Amino acid sequence: MNLELYKIEEELFQKFANLLFPQKINTNKLLNVLENSVKNLQCLKCKLIYLLKRDTYKISNIINIPLNEMLDIKQLFEKIEAAKSVRNLQKVLPQVINDLREAVNRVINNSNEIALKAKCIIDLNYRQNLSLQDVAGQLHICKDHLNRKFKKQYGYTINSYIINVRLKNALELLTFSNLSAKQVCYQVGFQTYRNFIYHFKKRHKILPKEIK
């Protein structure tokens, strides 16, 4: 996996799954990158369906509810499969992503569990410069109260959970991509390479570069 393709794939996941910081997705850019990495239209459609299946699974794990209980996932994928050209995909893809986003929003908006909402913010935005104060601010709640609620529910403080999520994703990237340790450091949200090395070694007992 090269860095450009990794970034655009992560943009797809982060932006259509981003429940509390909604942004418009540049689907044309996504299609252009994918089109250059595959051989034909059928391969392009297969790649898109793979990405959406992967991200649907990741989001389902975050909110602890299968998305197929809320909408017909198969029907959405069939819309992509039915596209006859890249131009058709440019029209269909935003609709598919919007349907998935709305399904996730329904789950979150129906939840009164503040700890779950905080967990979703972290799981979907750990790449940003995120802290307890940022999460509490998004939820309009006292940070100490939120931290107590979160620790009671999940066994971690907010800041500890942010580090855990970053380290988990860093290990995955170091293992399965060709990104360097320094690239991984900033991709998963650490602000300095030194801080990344400290936490990684503390957790895994080895240096990040030893994974490569």
Image (cartoon, rainbow, N blue to C red):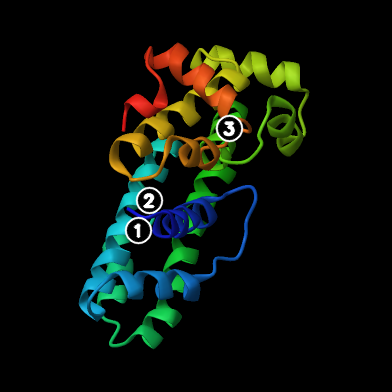
**Residue 210 picture location, percent across and down:** 33, 25
Q: Residue at x 57, y 14 (%)?
A: 151
Q: Earlier in the sequence, mark 3 or mark 1?
A: 1
82 lies above or below 37? below
Give the crowd class for mark 1: few <14, some 14-19, many >=20 residues within 10 Å: many
Q: Residue at x 44, y 16 (%)?
A: 201
Q: Which residue is mark 3?
A: 190
Q: Disc 3 to disc 2, how far (Cα)?
A: 22 Å
Q: Which residue is mark 1?
A: 52
Disc 2 on helix, strand or loop? helix
**Residue 112 picture location, percent across and down:** 60, 33
155 lies above or below 69? above
- Give the number of marks: 3
Q: Are marks 3 and 1 in contact (CB under 8 Å)?
A: no
Q: Residue at x 59, y 45 (%)?
A: 109
Residue 55, which numbered label? 2
- Disc 1 residue type? Leu
- Disc 3 residue type? Phe
